[in-house]
Image (tube, grey):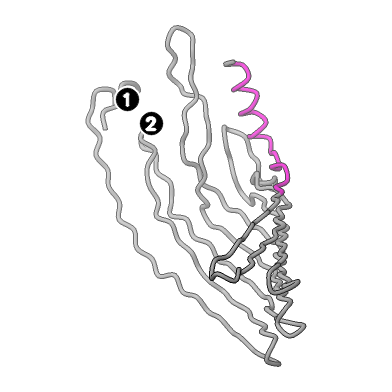
Amino acid sequence: IIFDEGALEGTRVTRDESFDDVSPRFVIEYEPREDLLVYASAARGYKAGGFNSTEINSFFEPENVWNYEAGFKSELLGRRLRFNGSAFYFKYKNRQSISLEDDNTCTEGLCLPTYVTRSGDSDAWGIDLETQFRVSTDLTLSAIASYLDSRWVTRIERGIDISGQPTGAPELTAVLGAHYDHELANTSAIFADASYSYTGRGRLNDATRDKYASISTLV
């Protein structure tokens, strides 16, 4: 990379890093009866770090997350009704996300923002529910609902401290569906699918509000 400003202007800059990780997963399952399974799990995830090419000496650390989950899976009413549920908790260290920030370089008074990767610690908890009911041989109804509360533990974005504020993910999501599949006498079939999805509004934080305000000034 050759920067066109600052102390390293015109100087070729080379930097490299290597990353490695071991990400374990632990699961415990128990079947108290034939139509019911309960479980608990703990798993670690990982994403390598990297560099922002638009910033001098910019580096972001590798991201890792521990996910803890407990739930159940059941098939009731002669396996016509499937009902599953789970609760989970995520704990992120150096969570990476894209931030739209003002560039320090301006051309003829116009300063265009650029996307850079920033990191911060965050945690989240939530609940997932899923059900599927076989009304008849031909018709199946389904529903999925999720609740999520995701917040930054430590995070500075656009120069603003948003620790303790939402990460931007919506709280509620849901999907309703219906599937119809009928076999005809001549070995052919007719089928139809219908679905409706809902996603709640993203939860704004002070940095997001500042970003929208900056964009509106460019329009």
Of residues 49 and 193, the one drawn nearer to the viewer in this rendering: 193
Asked whether, in this view, residue 21 is left or right of residue 67, the answer is left
Pointer 2 residue? 54
**Residue 35 drawn in magenta:** no
Amino acid type, residue under disc 1 in the picture: Ala
What residue did someone put label 1 on? 7
Residue that protrudes farthest toward the top in the picture:
108
State the residue at coordinates (71%, 75%). Answer: 82
Which residues are the magenta region?
198-217
Sequence-first disc among 1 and 2: 1
Residue 212, image x and y in percent?
A: 64, 27
Q: Is residue 2 above or below residue 75?
A: above
* Residue 95 image offset from top left, x and y in percent: 53, 52
Secondary structure state at the residue bearing disc 2: loop
Q: Quadrant of the C terminus?
A: top right
Q: Residue at x 38, y 31 (%)?
A: 54
Q: Residues within 10 Å of mark 2 (few under 14, many from 20)?
A: few
Number of numbered discs overlaid on the protein picture: 2
